[in-house]
Amino acid sequence: MENPYQTPNSIPQEEIYAESYQRNIPETPINLDATWCISRGWRLTCNNFKLFFLCITLPLIITFIINSILSTIAVKIDGQTMMNVGGQIIVRNNLGFANVIIGIISNLFSVVVGMGIIKVTLEFLDGKQVSFSTAFSQTNKMITGFIASILFGIMITVGLLLLIVPGIYLATRFGYFLHAIVDKNCGIMDSFKYSTELTRNNKMNIFVLALLTILVAIAGILALIVGLLWAYPTIYLALTIAYCCLHHGKSRRLEQI
């Protein structure tokens, strides 16, 4: 017999994770609460700081170091040009073969880590075990993510040149293309289509979420840079929480973890 005095909210953790949430695009769009996504991301970061430092922040630091080393190598190979502009000496890196090849390698590595971190956040929110290696687990989707990222960058750049607003619109509609590739194993064009369907009627909410993530990043920088150790996991988690909420709203799983 059940205890009538049992606290209603005392839900065993295994029951929360036992629920099966298939992330399918809902017929009726779910209104996204951007501030709730940020607050949940912050709370999860604070409660699991060591885990997310290992699985999110550290891979980002490694990516930065590797890309910096590769960039230095490219400059050494291709050399630099010094120009006198208005009495000021400006040093410009030569765009040679090394810069092009190393630039491609750097972007490929960044995309793999970016998708890996998305995998980390998705797995964690699904109640699964994550580790440092999870951040490097998406190498099989590297080419798809890389080409899709190039197309996304071109679209946003062209959109911003067309009076800025089109670029913001495209960013809010197509911004979840990498999540679609990681979570749904979508192809290049299907990932953009999936993101478009998922974000319908939520353009302003996603724009607000983007502004909030920028504010979190700025706050991390102002906090003597060290604040970025909390800012980056908060941002990645908030974006993935929003991705989940667009599928099934504020599920019990998201509210209880």
Image (cartoon, rainbow, N blue to C red):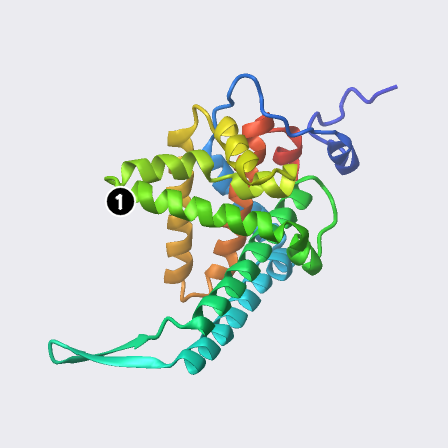
For residue 236, say whether it is visible. yes
Residue at the farthest right position: 1
Quadrant where the image shows the N terminus: top right
Q: Residues within 10 Å of mark 1 (few under 14, many from 20)?
A: few
Judged from the image, the secondary structure of the residue bearing numbered disc 1 is helix
For residue 42, say whether it is visible. no
Q: Quadrant of residue 247?
A: top right
Q: Position of residue 90 (x, y in %)?
A: 23, 77
Q: Is residue 82 above or below residue 224?
A: below
**Is residue 240 rendered to the left or right of residue 89?**
right
Residue at the farthest front position: 97
Q: Position of residue 88 (x, y in %)?
A: 16, 79
Residue at 57% x, 68% y is 62
Q: Amino acid at mark 1?
A: Leu
Residue at 37% x, 49% y is 215
Pick the residue in front: 73 or 122.
Answer: 73
Q: Is residue 2 above or below residue 68?
A: above
Q: Position of residue 154 (x, y in %)?
A: 39, 47
Residue at the farthest top position: 28
* Tag 1 residue: 161
Q: Position of residue 23 (x, y in %)?
A: 64, 30
Pick the residue in front: 137 or 146.
Answer: 146
Residue at 73% x, 33% y is 16
Pick the residue in front: 102 or 114.
Answer: 102
Pick the residue in front: 240 or 140.
Answer: 140
Residue at 78% x, 19% y is 4
Quadrant where the image shows the C terminus: top right
Count numbered badges in the picture: 1
